[in-house]
Structure formats: C-alpha cells, structure tokens
Image: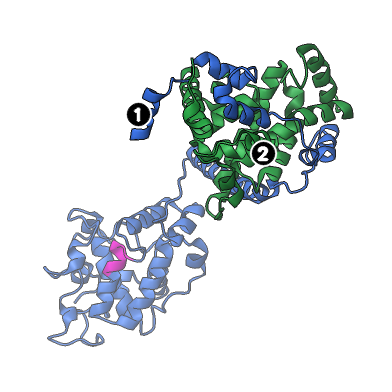
C-alpha cells in the first residue's frame, strides 16, 4: 500500500497522532483502509459489510493505543480484526439468514467465448472483489483478497489465516490459475 | 479435478510464481498480455476509493477521538450485548453458588457439623438443645432405629398398654417420649397421668415391665425419669408406701379387683414375661441388664416379689 499510502516514517507519525485521538490522523487511516475493507467485506457479506466495517473501526479505535508496529503490521492487524468480525457475523447470522446471490454477480462472470477486456477494465473495486469470490473457492478468494486488498505478503496472510506460508503459496497459485483460466481463457500461455 | 483441469495443464503453460507475484503486486500491467484480463481485475480491486466508500468517516473519527464505544450507525454490536449480559448473569449466579457451597463446606469442616439431609427436624432440634447425655443417647437410638418415636423403653410401655389399659398407657408413653427426646421444657411441664386414678393399673403395669428391664431408678425425681413414673412414685410416697407396695393391689395377678382381670386375660402373661413377647428381645435389651437388680433389690419380677404380696 505504499503506492497509495504511508511510508514507514509517515506512518509512525500518523499512528502516534491517531493514538492521541487526532482527527486528521484518523481520517488518513480511514481513507487508506476503508475502501479496501469494504471491498473485502462486500465480497463475502455484501449486505452486512457496512455494519461489519463499523465494528472493525470501533475495535481499531479501541485498541489502537496498544498497537506497536509498522504500516505493514498495521494492515495485517487491521485485516485480522476484519476477518474475525466477519466470522462473528457469519456465526450469528447463519441460522436466520437466507441470502440469495445477487444477479449482477453472475453478469460479472465473463463467458469463455467472450472475455471482453473492456468490460474487465471498467470493473469497480467492489465488482472485482465479487468476481473473485464468485469464481473461486472460499480459501482461494480470501488469500487473493488479503494479498491484493491488504497488500500483505505470504507470511502475513499465513498469520492472518492461521495457516502455513506454504499453504498460502499453493492456494494463491491455484487461485490465480483458476481465475486466469476463467477470465483469459485459452489464451493464457505463460513463460 | 475434472478432465478440463487436466487438459488445462497440458494445453497451457502454467503461470509461474514470478508472474503470479507480479500480478499480485501490480507490476505486470502492459507486460503480460496473455493475462491482461486477470491483471485488469486485480487493478480494479486496488482502485482508488469511490466517494460512496468513504461514508461513515465522521463516526470512525469520533470513535478515535472518544477513545471508542459509541457504535457507528448500523453496528450490530448491540446484538451481542444482550448475549454478553446473559452470559455474565449466568456466570455470576454460578460463581455465587459455587462460593456458597465452598463456604458452607468449609464451615462444616471447621465446626465438625455436617448437615445431613436424612436427619429429621426433631433430631436437629434435640441436637441444638444440649440435652442431657442420657436423653441424647436415646435420641441416637431412635435415629438408629429409623424411627424417632420408638425406643426400647417406649416399646415396653406400649406393650404394656396393649395388654392392659391402652388409654392409660398411651399417656405414659407420650410422657416417656417427651422425656426421652430431651425436651426439658416439655418434660418439666408435663403433668402426666394421675397415679391415684384410673391410670394406676396401667402405670403399675408399665412400671413392672420397666423395673424388669430398665436401667435406672424410676422412683427417683430425676428429670430423666418419665413423668408418669414420677407421678406413680409420688402417689406411692403420699400413701406412705413404696411403689411396689402401692402397685400391689393393681398389678395383675396380685389383685382380684384388678381392672380387666380374668383367667384368660392376656395380662396374665405380663409384659416382659412372655417367651414370645417382643419386648423381651427389644432393641437394646440385655438379659443381664440392670433389670435383674430391679429397684427394691429384688432379682425377681416386681410383680412376683412385690411388697405386701400375700
């Protein structure tokens, strides 16, 4: 996320200010992380994403004074909280919910005979996230989303998902291959 | 893995780890046309924020400034609070119960008194009153017999009542039980039957049986002596006689005028004298007990060696 966010020095300043309750520091963190958080959550729970995001920020605001680490560490911590809140929501909602898949998700899936690059280029962030989750298994989608939205490396994803780094590598490779097969079809010829 | 998956690996060169990392880091754009679609999806995923995605910033900032706790709009955390409250309540009750049990157990261990759910209320009352040792022993016997109203002596009295005058001896039995139960106030306040009246025969019959098997001087004024026997002793003293003399004309077999007396009267086999009389083998009865040296120094049945016997 260094391309769109903080370097380590600036992050240290922002973190210290946010821990003091500084408004601008809090806004900076929110602008950097909220869009990616919402995409991550809407990819899994489109209807409850806003509620879960609110809980995540409450948790972050509550505990940020105890946090110590780098910007990368902060992102890993942030998405760990998000993942746990998502799990909490699913645990409590699974018995009472009948959530249908929205029609637009299917519309997003390109047919193998019509991989229109223009259509893919026009995808919004949330559309892209939902395309991934609707095309891959749960673990594969989660690994890709954490790596892409959280800018987490393999070891960090392994920590968030409580898996081994090797499991993450294998899973992400399968995810990319499956997604490439679906999106780019038979033109995928690499190396 | 389907047939298509198998063919895919044959007909397509697998994506290398290096390219995978380039895709994930967003550094392949324009350099990997074969995965352009995938690359476009990944870039879309990392697109800058849409204004709609930044709603709720004020609430988040407020949470930071307030050090937390006010739920942001739409937060579902309120759903968990009742559960947390319920859980805390349940745990609190369980904890209080456990502490109470432990405390009660510790107190019982310290005092050496462990409440028994099988002890009767009567026994607990008696225990709490520091009754005389003899009375406490009687209570213990009662508990051993699983019947708080039956003792050896009470049984003897009851037998006497059965064979003679039930109405009279019932009073004696009640008085006896009151004393045996260690109820000092009841024993001291009890009037008991009038030994000079119709109860004389029953009392004398019970006295005869008691003297044979009893282990205490029933003519004494001790609080441990049943009030009925004390009345009998008092009546005998008032007449200037011993109890045996006083009962001489009332004991079955010694008086033709004895109430209910006849040749086939069961009282001819006085209590304690029948071979099959349960009172002869009543609980706690000893063949070599003090009854053999009954009051008056006689080693015989009082009814047989009663003073004044013709």
Q: Is residue B67 above or below residue B119?
A: above
What segment is highlighted magenta in the picture? B150-156
Q: Is residue B152 magenta?
A: yes
Residue B232: name its quadrant. bottom left
Residue B284: name its quadrant. bottom left
Q: Residues within 10 Å of mark 2 (few under 14, many from 20)?
A: many
The answer for which chain carries disc 2 is A
Residue A53: name its quadrant. top right
Percent position of residue A88, x then y: 59, 41
> In what element is the residue under mark 1?
helix
> In what element is the residue under mark 2?
helix
Report the residue marked by disc 2. Answer: A126
The residue lying furthest to the right in this view is A23
Q: Is residue A137 magenta?
A: no
Q: Which chain is blue?
A: B
- Disc 2 versus disc 1: distance between alpha carbons? 32 Å
Q: Residues within 10 Å of mark 1 (few under 14, many from 20)?
A: few
Quadrant where the N terminus of chain A lies? top right
Q: Which chain is green?
A: A
Q: Is residue B188 above or below residue B116?
A: below
- Relative horizontal placement of residue A12, taking residue B23 as reference (left or right): right
Percent position of residue A75, x then y: 68, 24
Query: Which residue occupies the foreground of this view, B176 or B181?
Result: B181
Query: Which residue occupies the foreground of this view, B234 or A67?
Result: A67
- Give the residue drawn at x 37%, y 34%: B4
Percent position of residue B310, x then y: 19, 77
Report the residue marked by disc 1. Answer: B6
Q: Is residue A73 above or below residue B209?
A: above
């Amino acid at each position: 996320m260094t391309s769109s966010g903080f370097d380590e020095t600036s992050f240290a300043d922002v973190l210290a200010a946010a821990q003091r309750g500084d408004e601008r520091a809090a806004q900076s963190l929110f602008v950097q992380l909220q869009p990616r958080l919402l995409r991550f959550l809407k990819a899994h729970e489109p209807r409850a994403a806003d509620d879960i995001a609110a809980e995540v920020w409450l948790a972050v605001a509550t505990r940020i004074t105890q946090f110590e680490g780098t910007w990368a560490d902060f992102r890993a911590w942030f998405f760990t909280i998000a993942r746990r809140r998502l799990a909490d929501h699913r645990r409590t909602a699974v018995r009472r919910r009948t959530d249908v898949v929205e029609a637009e998700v299917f519309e997003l899936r390109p047919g193998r005979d019509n991989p229109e690059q223009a259509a893919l280029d026009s995808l919004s962030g949330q559309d892209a996230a939902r395309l991934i989750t609707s095309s891959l298994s749960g673990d594969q989608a989660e690994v890709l989303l954490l790596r892409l939205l959280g800018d987490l490396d393999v070891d960090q994803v392994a920590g968030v998902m409580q898996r081994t780094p090797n499991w993450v590598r294998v899973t992400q490779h399968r995810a990319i291959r499956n997604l490439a097969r679906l999106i780019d079809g038979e033109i995928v010829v690499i190396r | 893995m389907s047939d298509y998956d198998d063919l895919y690996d044959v007909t397509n060169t697998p994506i290398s780890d290096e390219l995978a990392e380039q895709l994930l880091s967003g550094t392949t754009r324009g350099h990997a046309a074969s995965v352009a679609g995938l690359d476009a999806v990944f870039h879309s995923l990392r697109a800058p924020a849409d204004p709609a995605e930044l709603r709720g910033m004020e609430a988040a900032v407020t949470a930071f400034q307030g050090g937390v706790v006010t739920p942001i709009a739409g937060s579902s955390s309120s759903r968990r609070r009742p559960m947390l409250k319920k859980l805390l309540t349940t745990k609190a009750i369980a904890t209080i119960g456990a502490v109470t049990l432990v405390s009660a157990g510790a107190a019982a261990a310290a005092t050496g008194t462990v409440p028994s759910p099988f002890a009767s209320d009567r026994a607990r009352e008696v225990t709490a009153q520091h009754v005389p040792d003899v009375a406490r022993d009687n209570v213990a016997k009662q508990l051993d017999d699983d019947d708080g109203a039956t003792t050896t002596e009470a049984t003897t009295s009851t037998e006497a009542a059965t064979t003679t005058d039930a109405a009279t001896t019932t009073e004696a039995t009640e008085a006896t039980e009151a004393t045996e139960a260690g109820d000092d106030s009841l024993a001291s306040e009890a009037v008991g039957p009038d030994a000079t009246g119709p109860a004389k025969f029953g009392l004398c019959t019970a006295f005869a049986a008691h003297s044979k098997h009893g282990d205490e001087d029933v003519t004494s004024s001790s609080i441990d002596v049943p009030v009925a026997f004390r009345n009998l002793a008092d009546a005998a003293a008032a007449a200037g006689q011993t109890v045996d003399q006083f009962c001489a004309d009332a004991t079955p077999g010694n008086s033709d005028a004895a109430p209910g007396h006849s040749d086939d009267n069961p009282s001819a086999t006085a209590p304690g004298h029948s071979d099959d009389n349960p009172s002869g083998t009543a609980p706690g009865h000893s063949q070599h007990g003090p009854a053999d040296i009954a009051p008056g120094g006689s080693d015989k049945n009082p009814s047989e060696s009663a003073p004044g016997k013709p």
